[in-house]
Image (tube, rainbow, N blue to C red):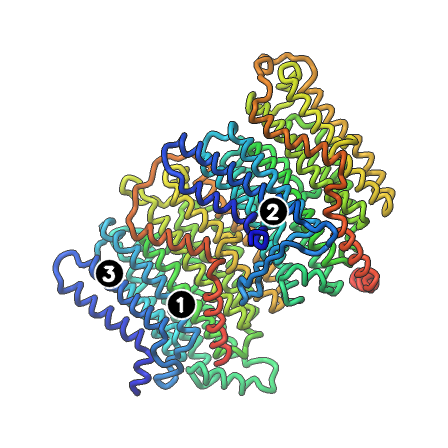
Amino acid sequence: MTFAELSMALPEIVLACAAMLLLMLGVYKSGNTTPMVSGLAVASLVVVFLMVISGGYPAGTGFNDLFVVDDFSSFMKLIILIAAAVGILMTTRFIQREGMNRFEIPVLMLLATLGMMIMVSANDLMTLYIGLELQSLALYVIAAIRRETLKSTEAGLKYFVLGALSSGMLLYGSSLVYGFTGATNFDAIARAIVAATSGETTASIGLVLGLVFVVAAVAFKISAVPFHMWTPDVYEGAPTPVTAFFASAPKVAAMALFIRLLAEPFGDLVNEWQQIIVFVSIASMALGSLGAIMQKNIKRMMAYSSIGHVGYALVGVAAGSAAGIQAVAVYLTIYIFMNMGVFACILSMRQQGEMMENIEDLKGLSKTSPAMALALVLFMFSMAGVPPLAGFFGKYMVFAAAIDANLYGLAVIGVLTSVIAAFYYLRIIKIMYFDEPVAAMDANGGEIKAVMVVSSAFVLFYWLFATPIINGASQAAAALFAAG
Amino acid sequence: MLIDHLLSVVTFAPLIGAAIILLIKGDEAVVARNSRAVALFVSVAVFLLSLVLWFNFNKSSADFQFTEKVEWMPALGLTYHMGVDGISVLFVLLATFLTPICILSSFGAVEKRVKEYMVAFLVLETMMVGMFAALDIVLFYIFFEGVLIPMFIIIGVWGGARRVYAAFKMFLYTFAGSVLMLLAILAMYFEAGTTDIPTLLGYVFNPDMQFWLWLAFFASFAVKLPMWPVHTWLPDAHVEAPTAGSVILAGVLLKMGAYGFLRFSVPMLPEATEYFTPLVYALSVVAIIYTSLVALVQEDMKKLIAYSSVAHMGYVSIGIFTLTQQGVEGAIYQMLGHGIVSGALFLCVGVVYDRMHTREISKYGGVADRMPRYALMFMVFMMASVGLPGTAGFIGEFLVLVGVFQVNTFVALLAASAMVFGAAYMLWLFRKVVFSALTSEEVRKLGDLSVREKVIFAPLIVLTIWMGVYPVSFLDFMAPSVENLITNYNAAIAASDAAPMFAQLFGQ
C-alpha cells in the first residue's frame, strides 16, 4: 500500500475521521451537543464535496484493485454528498424539537454516507459488501431511533430483517459468481466472463443464477418491484427527516452500484440482465403509479412515488448504453433535488406544533402559505414530468436512451404509467389549490425554507443551466464504458 | 436590435409581467387592483409589439422569418430556435390579441385571488406564443405541454361547481396523448439526427416508420383539436372554466392540434398522411354531424357553444387533409375566425352570467328587451358562427367546402349538410335567450353593456366583419406557405413508392 493509494481514498478517510471525532465530541462534551455535531457534520460533508469536485487526488484503481476512482464514482459521490448534507441539515432542528435529541443521528448519517461512497467506488464484490453493510447498519439504527414509538421500531425492524435477507442474497450470489468465474474483482470477473462466453452463445447457468441473486439483492436496496414491500412501511414509520434521507442518498448509491455491477463485471451478460431490468422497470413504474393513488399519508405516497422514479431510472439502465447511464445520472440528480424539496415541504407541515402527515392536511395551503404551496406545485408538476420543469428533462433523457436502444415497448409503457402517476401528483395540487383551508401551518425554520427555495429554483430553472450537469453525467458514463 | 429578437421578446415579456405581479404586496384590494393593471398593461404592450410582426412580415415568402437560433442544450442536440412562417404568424397574433381581451373581461368576473389569476394568464400567454413560434420540435413540445400547467390551475381554482373533475379530465386526456408524441419526437430525433423543424421538414422518413410516427402525433393532436371520440374533455372544460379560460381554450388552445397537423403530420409524414386521410375524414364528419346534434339538446349555453366548437374544428381537420390550396387556407381561416367568434360567444355568455350567475338557457328569455345593444352584438357573433356571408365564419367554411369538393364530393355533401344543423342550434339558442317572452324577474333587472364590455367587444366585432368582408388581408399571409406545403406534399407522394409498402404491411 503506497501513499498514492491512500490518497485516492482521501475523501473517504476524511469522512471516516470526521465521523469518529464527532462521536468523541458528542460523548465527552457536556450540554446539548446536537447543533454543534450536526453543524460540523455538514461542514465535513462540504469539505469532502469540495475535495471530490476539485479532483485533487489520483484517479484509477488502488488497494489491489479493490477500490476505483473515476468520473462515474466522482459524479455519484457529489450527488450523494449533496443529499447527505441536506438530509443532516433538515434533521437537526427536527430531532431537537420532536424529543429525539441525539447527537448520534448526524454521526450515523455521516457513517452511512461513508458506506455509500465506498459502495460507489467498489471494484470488488468484497468492497461492495463492506460498503453496503456499513451503509445499511447505520440506516437500520436511525430508522428505529425513536424506539419508544411503535411505528419507528416496526420500521427499523422491517428494514433490518429485509435488509439482512437481501444481504444474504447478495453474499450467496457473490459466492456463485466467485465459484463460476474464480474471482471477486470486477475486472477479473469481466475477463473471466469474456473468456468463458467466447465461442459460446449462452453464459453458464450457474453464473446467470449468481447474477440474478446479486441483481435481486440490489433491487431490494433501490426498492424496485418486486422487492419493494418494505418501502412504504419504513418510509411511514421512520422520523420524517430520516425518511427524506432514505429516499435520496442511499437510492443514488445503490443505483450507482447497480450500474457499475451491470456495466463492468457483467457487461458481457447484457442479454441476460437486460430482460430482468426491463421487467423490474415496468413493474416499478406501474406499481409506483398505481399504488400511490390510494394513499392518505403523504410519506407513504412518497414511498410509492420513489418506487416509480426508480422504475424510470431503470429505463435508462435497461438501455445498456452510455447514453442510458448518462440519462440515469441526470435523472438521479434531478430526483434528489425534487425529493429534498418535497420533504422540506412535508417537514413544514406542522400545525400548532404538531407534525402532520395526511395529504388532507394540505387543504387550502395556497391560501395559508402561498410560497410553500407554490414550491410544492413546482415539485409535483416536475415529478409528473411536465415541461419546462426539471423532471421533464430527466424523463426525456431516459426515454431517449430507451428509444435509441429500440426498447419501444418499455418506452410506451413508461410514458403511459407517467400519465397515471400524474393523477396523484395533480391530486396534491388539487388539495392545495382547489380546496378550502382548514388550519394554517406554523412558520418553519430557516434551513427548511432554504432547502425549499434552492430546490424549487433548481426545478424551475433547470433548463437554463442543464449543460454542465449533462456533460458531467456524460463523462461519468464514458468512464464506465471505457473501463468496461 | 429589437426586431432581431422580436419573437423572444413577445414570448417572454408576459413572464416578466408575471414576475412583477408576484412581487406585488399589500392588502388584498390594492394587490388585486395593481395586478389587474400590470397584467393589462403587459398584455396590451405585448400585443402592440406583436403588431410589428403583422407589418414587417414578408408576405411573398414561404420561409421562416424573424428567426432566432441559439445553442441551448448541445449535449441533447436541442437548440433554441424560433421563427414564424405564413401559417404560424397569424396564430401568434391571435394569441397576443385574445390575451388582453381575456384579462380585461375578467376585471369584473374574477374577484378572488386576482394576483394568481393574472400570473396564470400571463404564463399561459408565454406558452401559447412560444408554441406557435418554436422551430425546434422539443422546444415546441415544452411549450405545448407547458400550457397545461396554467390551464389546469385556471380551471381548477376559478372554475364552476365540477371544476376539479373538468381540470383533471383536461389534463390527463391531453397528457396521455402528448407523451406518445414525445416518443415519436425522440424516434424522429434518432432517425434524422436533429430536432430542428426546418431540417426535419426536408427529411424523408421511411413509410413504415411514418405509419407509427403519424399515429403517435395523431394521439396528441386529435385530443387537442379535439376530434371525435376523444373530444369529451372539451365540453366539461369549457363549462367549468371561467369565462376568460373558455375564451382562451376555444380561441387558441384548440388551434394547437390543427397547427400540429399542419406543421408536423402533413409535411413530415406525407405518405402516412395520404394513407390516413380517409380516417380523418370519417372522424371529422362524425364529429360535425354528431356534435351538432348533441348541441341541439343542450341546456347549458356554454356547453352548446363547446359542442359547436368541436363541429367547427371538424371542418378544420377536413380542410387540412384535403391538401388543396383552398382547403388548407380555409382550414387556417376557419381556425382564426373560430378563434375570434367562439371567443366572443363565450364572452357573450360571460356578460349575462356575470349578471345572473346561471348559464341555463331556460332561465333566460327576452333579454333583448332589457339589453338591446347586447342582443345586437350577440347576433353578429351568432351569425358569424353559423357562417353567414359577410362574417368571418363564412369564408373559412366556404373555402373548406370548395377544397373538399375537389377531392371527395361525398365528404363535401355531408359536411355541407351539417351547416344546417349549425344554423339550427345557434338560432335556437339565440331565440331562447334573446327573444321569446320576458317572464323571469331576474332578466327584468338586467342592465345593458357597460363601457368595459363595449371596449372588449368592439375589436372583436371589427375583426369579425373585416375577416368576412376583406379576407385577402389575412389570406395573403398564408398563401405562399400553404402553396409550399402542398407542393412539397405532392412531390413527396409522387416520389415515393408508399402504396406497395403499406400494401406489404397490411396486405397479409
**Numbered mark located on residue B178 in the image:** none
- The amino acid sitting under disc 3 is Gly
Relative image position of residue A96 (x, y in whole percent): 22, 52
Q: Report the residue at 42% width, 45% height from top.
A: A374
Task: Confirm whether circles 3 and 1 share one chain.
Answer: yes
Mark 1 or mark 3, which is nearer the start of the sequence? 3
Relative image position of residue A415 (x, y in whole percent): 57, 56
Q: Report the residue at 59% width, 62% height from top.
A: A410
Marks 1/2: CA–CA distance: 36 Å
Relative image position of residue A476 (x, y in whole percent): 46, 73
In which chain is the residue bearing label 3?
A
* Residue A277 visible in image: no
Residue at mark 3: A39
Relative image position of residue B13 (x, y in whole percent): 52, 47
Residue at mark 2: B174
| Residue A373 to residue A310: above or below | above
Task: Report the side of B439 relative to A433 (left or right).
Answer: right
In which chain is the residue bearing label 1?
A
In which quadrant of the rendered view does residue A431 lie? top left
Task: Report the side of A364 relative to B4 (left or right).
Answer: left
**Numbered mark located on residue A253 in the image:** 1
Closer to us: mark 3 or mark 1? Answer: 3
